[in-house]
Image: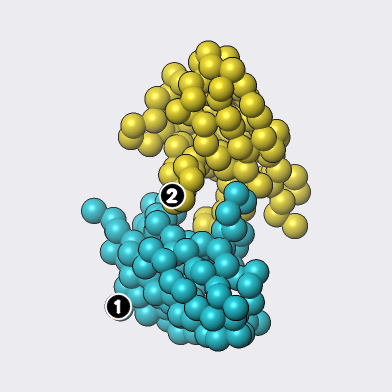
Amino acid sequence: GQNIDQPTEMTATEGAIVQINCTYQTSGFNGLFWYQQHAGEAPTFLSYNVLDGLEEKGRFSSFLSRSKGYSYLLLKELQMKDSASYLCAVIDSNYQLIWGAGTKLIIKP
Amino acid sequence: GAVVSQHPSWVICKSGTSVKIECRSLDFQATTMFWYRQFPKQSLMLMATSNEGSKATYEQGVEKDKFLINHASLTLSTLTVTSAHPEDSSFYICSARTGDYEQYFGPGTRLTVT
């Protein structure tokens, strides 16, 4: 079967750095997304990785290792508004999006 | 670009009535649209995938006669929750895809059935 694993919840301090991991086993791979979702709102796009390596976009970076079936989202200089759920999703060989359950990130002052 | 709208943003209806939710891609043509449901503190659950002009493909466990999906054009898909019950109360989110992979999400519709 297809499976995406990410931690259920993480806590970090304002101004710090946090890394949210995602591992996947899917039938084929055509890219990996990270989305941010605030409570009561729809997800918003953060990043897309299809090649190995690190993609940096401001305070957020996303890393992919296809051989390891592994990705992480790195958030720097954490702000209170970063408190949200972070969803990892993989596109399989049929171009279907397979979703992880999401990681709830709690930022403390 | 790539904006998806949903209407209404929230709706309260009585048990037994039907509710229609619209999903529109405003500035692009969506080859495929997806309907998700999300219960509080849970992840997105894909309900169905619809392609313009063809019948929707429903995920296992989703009743096609209860959740009617019409993808009438490349910019509009509708989800009708028929004979709604309180357990149908949820956050319904649509997304639209153009090309092979990227999905753009609508803002969601919060349905409360009393």
- Residue at x 45%, y 37% (from the top left corner): B47
Binning the other alpha carbons within 10 Å of mark 2 as few (below 14), some (14 to 19) or many (20 upward) gives few
Q: Position of residue B88 (x, y in %)?
A: 48, 28
In the drawing, does residue A80 fall left or right of residue B64? right
Binning the other alpha carbons within 10 Å of mark 1 as few (below 14), some (14 to 19) or many (20 upward) gives few
Which chain comes out yellow in the rendered image?
A: B
- Between circles 2 and 1, the one closer to the viewer is 2
Q: Position of residue B79 (x, y in %)?
A: 57, 29
Q: Position of residue B98 (x, y in %)?
A: 60, 51
Residues behind callouts 2 and 1 on a single chain: no
Q: Residue furthest front?
A: A109
Chain where mark 1 sits: A
- Residue at x 63%, y 72% (from the top left corner): A80
Q: Secondary structure at mark 1?
A: loop
Q: What's the amino acid at mark 2?
A: Gln
Residue B6 seen in render? yes
Residue under circle 2?
Answer: B42
The tag on residue A99 is none
Residue under circle 1?
Answer: A68
Q: What's the amino acid at mark 1?
A: Lys
- Residue at x 37%, y 66% (from the top left corner): A6
Q: Position of residue B108 (x, y in %)?
A: 62, 43
Query: Which quadrant of the structure image shows residue B2?
Result: bottom right
Which chain comes out cyan in the rendered image?
A: A
Q: Residue furthest top?
A: B16
Q: Is residue A92 above or below residue A18?
A: above
Chain where mark 2 sits: B
Query: Which quadrant of the structure image shows residue A67?
Result: bottom left
Query: Which quadrant of the structure image shows residue B1?
Result: bottom right
Residue B98 seen in render? no
Q: Is residue B82 above or below residue A5?
A: above
